[in-house]
Amino acid sequence: MSRLLLLIAIAAVVYLLIKSYRKNLPRQDQAVAEDMVRCAHCGVHLPKGESVQDDGHSFCSARHRDAYRK
């Protein structure tokens, strides 16, 4: 019976140590939301940072920018 209580006590200590360790870990920052733009040629939506900008329009690729100009 005493061995069972000892095992339960050890499990409780390990659980509390793991819980304390996880609580002290730095949280990973979530990605900052970025504005979405629509390709003027095909209409696909993509993050503004990944788009190709030209003459006030947004495009998903240089090929679509060139096709839109024609």
Image: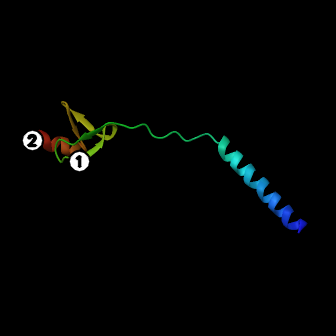
| Residue 56 occupies quadrant | top left
Q: What quarter of the picture does the N terminus occupy? A: bottom right
Q: Residue 44: x percent and y percent?
A: 23, 47
Q: What quarter of the picture does the C terminus occupy? A: top left
Q: Residue 51: x percent and y percent?
A: 28, 39
**What residue is at 12 percent from the left and 39 percent from the top?**
69
SS category of the residue bearing label 2: loop
Pick the front one: 57 or 23: 23
| Residue type at the position of mark 2 | Lys
- Lower sequence index among marks 1 and 2: 1
**What residue is at 80 percent from the left and 61 percent from the top?**
8
| Residue type at the position of mark 1 | Val
Residue under numbered circle 2: 70
Pick the front one: 63 or 22: 22
**What residue is at 69 percent from the left and 49 percent from the top?**
19
* Residue contact between numbered discs 1 and 2, judged by CB atoms under 8 Å: no
Q: Residues within 10 Å of mark 1 (few under 14, many from 20)?
A: few
Horizontal relation, residue 2 to residue 14: left or right: right
| Residue 36 occupies quadrant | top left
Q: Residue 45: x percent and y percent?
A: 26, 45
SS category of the residue bearing label 1: loop
**What residue is at 61 percent from the left and 39 percent from the top?**
26
Horizontal relation, residue 52 to residue 23: left or right: left
The numbered mark at residue 13 is none
Q: Residue furthest right?
A: 2
Residue under numbered circle 1: 44
Q: Residues within 10 Å of mark 2 (few under 14, many from 20)?
A: few
